[in-house]
Image (cartoon, grey):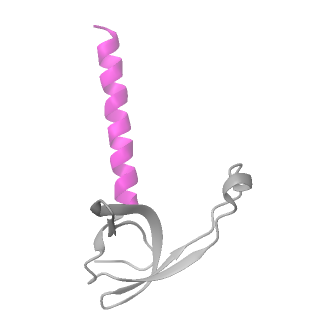
Amino acid sequence: MFKVGKEYEFIFLTCTDRGPTETGGRRWFVQAVEGTLLHLHLPASPPAAADKYLGPSHEQNMILNTASPFFHSARLTEEIDADSKRLADLAKRWRASNQHN
């Protein structure tokens, strides 16, 4: 299911004082797959204006067990970006067709 070198957006389940909730939306690159274990990498972000308030982001690595009950889902970022582009194109066409009415 997971391909080495591809970027995925991961969603995890966490437990808060309000009960279980979904968290995530972070994009990680798969570096290796060993059964249910994924070796993930998140490169540091380029310098940004917010760094003076938040501090610079650092590169991160993580091993994720996809058999864990806290792993919810993952989706290829290529698919997410393609869906976003399709929705933006539909919105443009809808606005263009409704400006004449």
In this view, the residue in front, 87 or 44, is 44
> Is 8 situated above or below 82?
below
**x then y, percent, for residue 87:** 33, 39
**x then y, percent, for residue 97:** 30, 17
Asked if residue 61 is among those painted magenta in the image, a careful observer would answer no
**x then y, percent, for residue 57:** 64, 65
Asked if residue 83 is among those painted magenta in the image, a careful observer would answer yes
Q: Left or right? Give the position of 43 relative to 73.
A: right
User: Please, what is the dominant secondary structure of the magenta stretch?
Assistant: helix
Q: How many numbered marks appear?
A: 0
In the image, what residue occupies the spot 30% across and 24% down? Answer: 94
Spot the residue most to the bottom. 34
> Is 83 situated above or below 16?
above
Q: Left or right? Give the position of 30 relative to 57.
A: left
Q: Quadrant of the N terminus?
A: bottom left
Q: Left or right? Give the position of 77 relative to 55.
A: left
In the image, what residue occupies the spot 42% across and 80% down? Answer: 4
Q: Quadrant of the C terminus?
A: top left
Q: Quadrant of residue 36?
A: bottom left
In the image, what residue occupies the spot 46% across and 65% down? Answer: 27
Q: Give the magenta part as a residue range.
A: 77-101
